[in-house]
Each structure stands twice: as structure tokens, then as C-alpha cells.
Amino acid sequence: MLRFILDLVSALRGFFICRADLALEILALRQQVAVLKRKRARPKLGRMDRLFWMALRRAWSHWAEVLLIVKPDTVVGWHRTGFRLYWRWRSRGRAGGRAKVTLETQELIRRMGRENPSWGAPKIHGELLKLGFALSERSVSRYLRAVQRRGDPGKRWLAFLRNHREAIVALDFFTVPTASFRVLYCLFVIEHARRKILHFHVTAHPNSDWVVQQLREAFPDSVPYRYAILDRDTKFDAGVLGALRSIGLKPKRTSRESPWQNGVAERWVGSCRRECWTM
């Protein structure tokens, strides 16, 4: 740590010498770095070295042009690792969990699914709550996967998307990690017919009230659409569903852990991640 501080103080000396001396010093240092790189192709970097390059990457846009000892992608990888470690630390200490679903309850879920082919997880979950069973809708959906049911729900959903493509919009969130380990949330609305983005906005603290306001801005007048596809994010609560109905849109929620049902939105998110940023 002391060695790093001394090196940093020595580097600050460059701000107080003339440009010609500074240019010659940089040339001499680069030549020495090139010699060291030939003798030892992969130098070992400490934690402080990595922190220095991560900070320089954030503060200076031309950092990659002077980087010689490692590849720029390596520095980006260090930042991603730091982001994961930071949020793992923020999420530590969680204890407890859900109560285990008994074998009798699991068999009851499967039996209700076999005897009522048209019932989905929300319907079966509601019936179980009436009977006094305390479990989540997600647990019901997980145990229904093993049930062989008449018809193919996937084909029915694809037929719905195909038949009503001109009247469907989709909305979803995706996250953007920042250099300071913050997370920004982007809400967007996209139409299915021409894959056109109708509205988007970014916030660090999303909630249902904010989503309702974005819907008002996205659809200020009457809309030519009939359906709005959205997932089961907790931010899409009853207030958001009511706002969609007041606009004239019928909410259609996707099944749990089924991003393929909102494929148009998911593909647009993938394009953003590949083409717009490296994080």
C-alpha cells in the first residue's frame, strides 16, 4: 500500500514539469515497459494495480490506448468481477427460506393439473389457498411441469401472438450496471408489429407508481392496440394492471420463468446488451 502511494505521488510530478521533459520521460518509460514485456510476457498484478486501472478506466476515455501490460478486455473483466463481489457482499446474511412442500401437497397439485387440463398455476394456486394450503404460485408452477396435459400451451400462446401481432405491445425492464456499482433500471414499451420502441425511461428506484406514470406518457391518447404482454415482476402490481385497462389494453401476463413468451422484448434487450454497452 505504501509503495503504491509513493508511486502515485511520483506520478503527480508530471503535472509540474515542462511538456518536452514529460514527453521524453514517457518515451523512456514506454521503452522500458516494452523490454520488460519481452522478458516477462505476463507480469503479475496486485490488487492495488487492478484498482488503479479500474479507476483510470472510469476517469479517462483514452485509457485503452496506453495499456500495454494486459488487454483492455482484462480490465473490463476486473470491473465485472468487482461488480459481482460487491453485490454478493450486499446480499450476504440472508437466512431462512420457504417451508418445504410436503409430498402429499405435491401429489395434490399434480392431480388437480391432470383432472383440470385448462387450469394453469394461478387457478390451482387460488384453489389451494381456499383449502388452507400456504405456498406460492411459483411452487405450484414448478410441480405442474411433470404433468402431461392435453394440448400444447406453447402452441396456443404462439398462435395468440401470430393472430394478434398488429394489436400487441410488450413492456419489460432490464438492468444496466454502472462503473460505481449502481444499477439502473430501464423500462421500455415495444410494439410487436414493426418492433418499434414506443417509449423508454431510466431510473435507479423503480416502483409501480413510476411505471404507471411511464404508461401515461407512452399512451397519452387512444391506442390502436388491444393487448399488453408483461411478466410477473412485482413492480407490475394491481395499480399497473388497472392503468393498462384504463388505457384500453388487456394485460396478458407470461408464465413464470418463461421469457420466450415475451420474445420480442427479450430479443431487443439482447441487441442492446451486444451492441450498446460492454457491461
Image (cartoon, grey):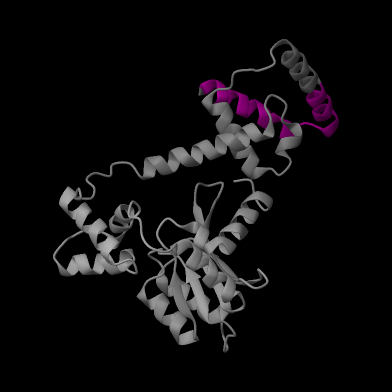
- Left or right: 162 in relation to 69: left
Q: Position of residue 75 (x, y in %)?
A: 62, 34
Q: Quadrant of residue 89?
A: top left
Residue at the front extreme of this rendering: 150
Q: Residue at x 38, y 63 (%)?
A: 150
Q: Is 14 contained in the magenta span?
A: yes
The chief SS type of the magenta part is: helix
Q: Position of residue 279 (x, y in %)?
A: 59, 46
**Relative vertical location of residue 14 with respect to residue 250 in this rendering, above or below:** above
- Left or right: 24 in relation to 170: right
Q: Nearer the viewer, residue 272 or 18?
A: 272
Residue 70 can be seen in this image: yes
Q: Nearer the viewer, residue 270 or 58?
A: 270
Span shown in magenta: 2-27
Q: Nearer the viewer, residue 103 or 187?
A: 103
Q: Quadrant of residue 27?
A: top right
Residue 102 can be seen in this image: no
